[in-house]
Amino acid sequence: MSKKTILSGIQPSGRLHIGNYFGAIRQHIAMQEEGDSFYFIANYHSLTSLSDGKKLKQFTLDVTLDYLALGMDPDKCTFFAQSDVPQVTELAWILGTLAPVSMMEKGVSYKDKVAAGLSPNIGLFTYPILQAADILIYCSHLVPVGADQKQNIEFSRDLAQKLNRIYGDDLLIVPEPHILESVAVVPGTDGRKMSKSYDNYIEIFEEGKPLKKKVMSILTDTTPLEAPKDPATCNVFKLISLFADENLKEEISDKYKAGGYGYGHAKKELLGLINERFAEAREKRKELEKNEDYVWDVLRQGGQKARARAEEIMQPIREATGV
Ligand code: ADP
Ligand code: TRP
C-alpha cells in the first residue's frame, strides 16, 4: 500500500508561540517521517489579516526559520510556500462555486476574528475554501492541526464530497483531521487561549530577560505562599505539564498541594523547562539566520515538488468541470 499523504499549513502572521508549538508544530515535525508529507507556509491566508508586504515577507522567512530550527527536514517532506502553487487558487475558485453561503456563514473562525477586530473582508469570509483547496489539491489523507481547526477540516470534507458527487467519484480524497486532544488548548499568560491576536503569548524563540518577563507575568490567583494550591486550575502548572515528564509533573503537583511552594517558584521551574526544551533549536536558528539564501532555496525547491503534484490532481478536475 502506498504511503498516506499528510498535510498541514501555518500562517506567517507573526512570530510563532508555544501554543503553536504544542498545538501544531510539534506534531508536524514528528509526522514528517510517517507519510508522504506536505507542510506549507500559508501566505495567501495571512493576506486576509495583514496588508504589509515587507512584514509578510519577513514573517514568511521567520516561520520557515522556526520550522527548520525545530527539526523540519526538507529531505523528508515537501516544505513550501502556499503561493508557489497557483493551482491552489484555481481549485479554490471551483470549490467556491460549490460552497453554499449558508455553510460559510456558520464559520466560527470568521466570527471570532471579526469579533477580535479584524476587517471583515471577503478573503477572511472565504478563508475555509482556500484552506480546503490547500488540503484537497495534494489529495491529503490526514491533516494534523489544533482543535480550533476542526470546523475548517469539516468544510474541506464536505466540499470534497460535493465535488466528487457532482463531477466524478475519484477526483478528490476526503481528508481526516488529526487532533492531539491532550494539548487541545494551550493557555496564554492571561489564562485565555494563547494567541497572536491577544497579547498573551510566549514566543518559542524568545530568550533572556524578555522571556523571563513574560513567564513572570502569567496570571495566577492570590493564594498566599504558605497555603496549599490546586495545580488543576493554575495556568503556570498547565504550561509546566506540557514541558515536564510524568515524574516531574507529579513532583510539582505534590508541592502545590503541600503548600509552602509559591507561584514564583513554579514560574522559575517553567522558565527552566522552556530554556531547556528550546536550547538546541535556538542555536540552530542562529546558524540558519546567517544563510538566508539557503532558507529561500528550501522553499523554492519545495514549491517545485508541490506544484508538480498539484498539477496532476488539477488536470482531471479541469476536464471534469469543462474549463
Ligand atoms: P494564533 O491563534 O496565534 O493566530 P494560529 O491560528 O495561526 O494561531 O494557529 C496556528 C496553529 O497553531 C493552528 O494549528 C492552531 O490550532 C495551533 N494553535 C494556535 N494557538 C494554539 C493554542 N493556544 N493551543 C493549541 N494550539 C494552538
Ligand atoms: N487555518 C490554519 C491556521 O490558522 C492554517 C492553514 C491554512 C491550514 N491552510 C491549511 C492548516 C491547510 C491545515 C491545512 O492554523
Image (spheres, rainbow, N blue to C red):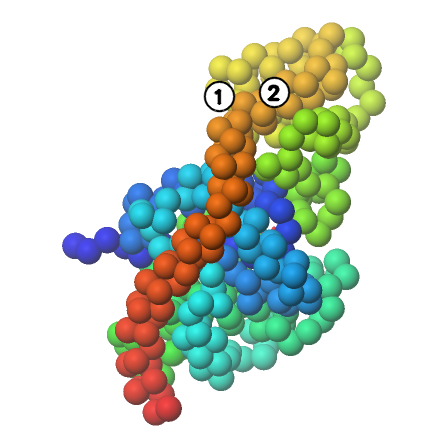
> Do we see residue 1 in this rendering?
yes
Task: Write down the residue under mark 2.
Answer: 272
x and y percent of residue 75 in the render?
31, 48
- Left or right of residue 220: residue 184: left
The amino acid on which the numbered mark 1 sits, given as a three-letter code, is Asp
Tell me the residue at 72%/41% (across/down): 200
Q: Is residue 113 left or right of residue 306?
A: right
| Coordinates of residue 44 in the picture (x, y in percent) | 55, 67
Left or right of 211? Residue 97 is left
Position of the C terminus, as image quadrant, is: bottom left
Q: Which kind of residue does numbered mark 2 sit on?
A: Gly
The image position of residue 48, as x and y in percent, is 64, 67
The furthest residue to the left: 1
Residue 159's disc number: none
The answer to which image quadrant residue 213 occupies is: top right
Residue behind mark 1: 245
- Tell me the residue at 54%/49% (across/down): 63
Q: Is residue 175 visible?
A: no
Label 2: element kind: helix
- Using residue 64 as the reference point, say whether residue 261 is left or right of it: right
Q: How many marks?
A: 2
Classify the position of the N terminus by image quarter.
bottom left
Residue at 58% across, 25% down:
275
Tell me whether circle 2 and circle 1 mark residues in contact (CB < 8 Å): no
Residue 236 or 285: which is nearer the viewer? Answer: 285
The foreground one among 94 and 73 is 73
